Amino acid sequence: MPSPSQGLDGEVTITLGAKGVVELELVSSGEKWVAVHAKMFTRSNKARLDSPAWHLVEALATLVSPDGNDPAIEGFATKARPVSAAEKKMIAEAATRLSEANAKKLLESITGCTT
């Protein structure tokens, strides 16, 4: 997923991609455990019918830590290679080129929302 971008200050960045990206589609259905039509699963019927969508939300919440930042899957990163000294240096150098103020301005210009 390489992509070029240009900041408000004219700096051009080329992102070379991402590692570990997973794309999937999850379908939540109660047809197998409740003998009603799918259109019955609405908020107005929640008092009478359990909601498959909320079960899916709860299941997804178990995949990450409570703050949403770390995988909560046992052994998820056990085979991951540690970051090398050269990679740490590249990350530190890249961080010096990033400006939080410019990032906020760029987001404001795209979304129209102020931070």
Image: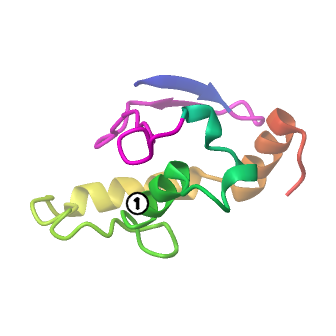
Give the image location of residue 61, x and y in percent.
Answer: 46, 64
Q: Residues within 10 Å of mark 1 (few under 14, many from 20)?
A: few
Q: Residue at x 70, y 57 (%)?
A: 100
Image-quadrant location for residue 5:
top right
Residues drawn in magenta:
7-36
Give the image location of residue 60, x and y in percent.
Answer: 43, 57
Q: Residue at x 46, y 67 (%)?
A: 69
Q: Quadrant of the N terminus?
A: top left
Which residue is at the far bottom?
66
Q: Is residue 10 magenta?
A: yes
- Residue 59 versus residue 12: which sits nearer the camera? 59
- Residue 44 versus residue 1: which sits nearer the camera? 44
**Could you tell me what secondary structure mostly forms the magenta stretch?**
loop
Image-quadrant location for residue 72:
bottom left
- Residue 16 versus residue 28: which sits nearer the camera? 28
Which residue is at the far left?
79
Give the image location of residue 8, x and y in percent.
Answer: 78, 35
Q: Residue at x 44, y 46 (%)?
A: 34
Label 1 is placed on what type of residue?
Answer: Ala
Q: Is residue 42 magenta?
A: no
Count of residue discs = 1
| Disc 1 secondary structure class | helix
Q: Is residue 36 above or below residue 50?
A: above
Q: Which residue is mark 1?
A: 59
Q: Residue at x 55, y 53 (%)?
A: 51
